[in-house]
Image: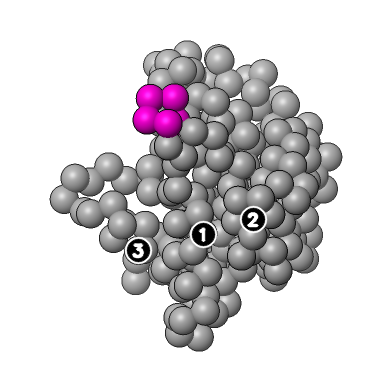
Amino acid sequence: MGRKDNYATDVFINCPFDDAYRATFETVVFAVLDCGFRPRRALELDDSAEVRIEKLLRIIEECRFGVHDLSRTELDASTGLPRFNMPLELGLFLSAKRFGDTRQRQKRCLILDRRPYRYQKFISDIAGQDIRSHRNSARVAIRVVRDWLHNHSNRETIPSGSIIHQRYQAFRRALPDLCMQLELDRMELTYKDYSVIVSKWLALTT
């Protein structure tokens, strides 16, 4: 039946994917995988034949869960303008939950920012949501994502955030050797590269 069979475990990751945010992004992806879920985002498929917004809508439709990090609000150095992709993708996810069918109304959403209450200054319409702060800390981000997935999924047990963080630290130490074995450059890892490496490491160590 295709990807929709994984609706209950697919997690849409909506956050920047650049050098400045890479550490937080990799932390979130690791936490989702270690909790037994599957991270999804538009970077997973490079298909020039598919319009980007259609790709986003399709992936959002296929995911029950969504992690949305709104911490990137700085102006772009070259254009002097902010990036609005993350708020847009959050809006699409919330709209799918509000206006979708019974399946889409099962969606659950985690909204992150780097500091508490900062979002009130740039996107106050979501003030009714439960916004969580990760403070740019891997330990905090892992705990927040783990606790949220555990609270909103049917899984009876998921390792504690501190345990997952310990595994993440061990994975980080092993990553250079893993990249060497797979003939991959650590600084050139794509989203798919990283997800595959994490999945293989977790399968061998947990």
Circle nearer the N terminus (3, 2): 3
Please state if 28 lies on the left or on the right of 182 as rendered. right
Location of residue 79 in the rendering, given as x and y in whole percent from the top left corner: 37, 30
Residue drawn at (59%, 47%) of the image = 70
Question: Mark 3: which amino acid?
Answer: Arg
Location of residue 168 in the rendering, given as x and y in whole percent from the top left corner: 70, 32
Circle nearer the N terminus (2, 1): 1
Q: Mark 1–mark 3 contact, CB under 8 Å?
A: no
Callout 1 crowding tier (Cα within 10 Å): few <14, some 14–19, many ≥20: many
Residue drawn at (62%, 34%) of the image = 24
Residue 90 is marked as: 1
The verdict on residue 78 being magenta is: yes
Q: Mark 2–mark 1 contact, CB under 8 Å?
A: yes
Residue 162 is marked as: none
Circle nearer the N terminus (1, 3): 3
Q: Which residue is mark 3?
A: 58
The verdict on residue 112 being magenta is: no
Question: Mark 1: which amino acid?
Answer: Leu
Please state if 12 lies on the left or on the right of 202 as rendered. left
Label 1 and label 3: CA atoms lie apart by: 14 Å
- From which residue to which does the magenta span run? 76-80
Most common SS among magenta residues: loop
